[in-house]
Image (spheres, helix red, strand yellow):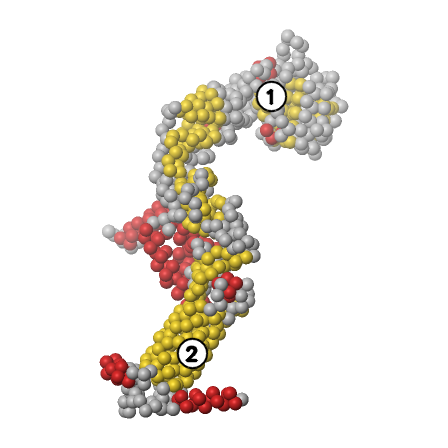
Amino acid sequence: MGIRNITFINASPAIQVSNGSSQVSIRNNIFEGAGTSIAINVGDALSSPVILNNTFFDNGTAILSLSQPNLSIVNNIFANNGTAISTTVSISNILSNLFWQNSTAGPSTILFNAPGNPDYKQNVNTQDPQFVNLLGTDYTKWDFHLKSTTTTTTAVGDASAGANSINGVSPPDMGAYGGSLSDAIPFPVSGLSGAVSGPSIDLTWSSNPCYMIQGYKVFYSANKSGAPYDSTQDAGNVTSFTLGPLTAPTSTLTAPVLSSSPGSGILKLTWTPSSGATGYNIFYKESSAAVYNPPIQVGNTNTFDLSGLTNPTPAGVVTYYDVYVQPYYQAAYHIAVKPYYNSTDANKLALVYSNEISVPFGSLIDGPVSNTITDFPEPITAIPALPNKGCFIATAAYGSYSASQVQALRTLRDRYLQTNGPGRAFVRWYYTYGPRGAQILNDHPEWKPVVRAALLPAIGIALFLTHTSSLTKILFIMIFATSIVLLLYRKKLPPFGGIQ
Amino acid sequence: MKRAIGGVLLLLIMMMPLSVQAAEQASERPHWSLELKGGIFIPAIDNWSTYYGRRDILEFGGSLAYKILRLIEVGVEGTYIKDKGQGYAPIHNMAAGNVTYELAPLNVFILARGVISDNQWLIPYAGGGWTRMYYREEVQYQGIVRGSTDGTHARAGLQIVLDSADARAAGNLYKDYGIFHTSLFFETRYTRAMITDLAGSSVNLGGTSYLMGLLFEF
């Protein structure tokens, strides 16, 4: 069996080989941070694993074999361990390993190269492996690839163990990222930043010092965050790059529909999304004031708590506020970087993107303003506080204003009906006649199940429209249209076995 | 006791027929009653003046009834009551904001009029029936609630037949519009329409109305 490409962090032991396990191959693993514990424990004389191209870092004992001499320990890096190899028997095959800053390398039978006389069949204890990154205390962020300045790569790797999978050249690298079965995917880079420069964006990022890095690819999308990105450019083996010239995409904004509910000194604002908006400005003033306060930029959200407003005075005098929302559009490029070992081999590209940056690009465009609402930042209850029995039919049918089905219909109203003329006309009509229907329904509760059943299609449509992505909607429409076409076409076909 | 007896006697004297010829023809009698009325409504809600300032509210309305007998009529009455005041700000426990409160009681009633003689000029009446109380509350900028509740009402009053005041005009009203009698009336109405408010308490949306108006019998 093979144990490959696994990172063991603080495992005790990470691997226990016993009970006569034969043909065990432990390759390209990382054992780190086990402290005083054992990384690999070969527990009996019958098991004889092959331990090839692993990196052992900061373990109590990297390999313990008290009774099995027939181990094959080749092309591993032992660094900063208490004891690299602990054994009371004479292990026959300890070749081409790198030992660095271990308290104890191992038994005296380990043979090391003499300085100036490299022999890759032996072992090395005079070279810093130069791992890419051991900064910080987060083991998961450590990168045991080797830097370009390392001499380990060409000095000691045992070519008989197979060529390096990254570049296909023998001898293979030492450690977890060497050998024919190593993981040939570079670690991501960090520190990406960018600034607009004329029609372009100047980018810089932190280098990935792995010696096998051949370059970096820049991924970017306009107005869309996250992968998959729309475009890619190969920057080459640099850490700064000018992306461009670019063109800022434009957008046509629609007016949102604003509503509010009062809190204590707060107006809780909610508005319908403005198509294409990348953010919103909140304008407000006391109703008696002539000029609006400076706008509050709230980003691309559809809710905001306008706080710090004046509560009623002890004399009961209230301060009303006028509020409206204005969407704006600011084009932005979302950019990330990946390093690669081979620009033409997608399998040798980093799996993880760098940090993504969003760079505003082009002029800011203000959209049409919403309706202006006037409200007071504290809920007022009429006396007597009477129930609203004139609400919508759905509320009457489902028994509660906060029922999820009613909420779905409200969302449908706000997003799809209030945003266009016919929709608003329907809402007005419904507000006129809906209360009467609700009243009738409340007076005849035995009809509610029937009305709930009748409302199901509308609720289904509301949930579909408000809880699915644009792509899902398009796919559904395409499937629906295709089904209709197939149904019609099928009716035209002759019966099975017939002749047309 | 003497005062009560005196009052009853005075009422009976006033109800005695007068010599003035009314517009009603001997062979005919009115079948319909139309009332146009207005006055004040005093809500049964205890702390009304705390939020609305005054205890009384203007009320206007009318009724149409059919006389199934000369003394008995059934009909429908509708009035409208509106007041403006403040609401309750619960966070700061004070009256605040602007509230418009409207009631529209719709009454279905049966009424008995104390008609003894065709020439009687003072007629007492009393009746009552079922009430559907429609309400609407608007908190300025913060929404509207509306609804209705059922109740009952009772009313009593006194009508003064005006035919004797201007017999010629009364005659013309009959000839031109078929109105047998025109009366000025004063009445008191009590309405009880209970509803459970948002706090779970039972509230009487009704109250006492003091109304006057004109009654046309045709």
Write down the quadrant of residue B80 in the picture.
bottom left
Question: Depth check: A472 or A487 in front?
Answer: A472
Question: Which mark, by number, is residue A131?
Answer: 1
Q: Amino acid at mark 2?
A: Glu
Report helix, strand or loop for mark 1: strand
Residues indicated by labels 2 and 1 sit on the same polypeptide chain: no
**Residue B30 relative to residue A103: left or right:** left
**Which corner quadrant holds the N terminus of chain A?**
top right
Report helix, strand or loop for mark 2: strand
**Residue B156 relative to residue A120: left or right:** left
- Residue B15 horizontal/vertical position (percent): 39, 89
Front of the two marks 2 and 1: 2
- Residue A49 horizontal/vertical position (percent): 65, 27
Q: Amino acid at mark 1?
A: Phe
Q: Taking the image as drawn, is residue A300 in sight?
A: no
Q: Residue at x 62, y 27 (%)?
A: A136
The chain under label 2 reads B
Q: Residue at x 42, y 32 (%)?
A: A332
The chain under label 1 reads A
Question: Which mark, by number, is residue B187?
Answer: 2
- Residue A221 horizontal/vertical position (percent): 41, 32
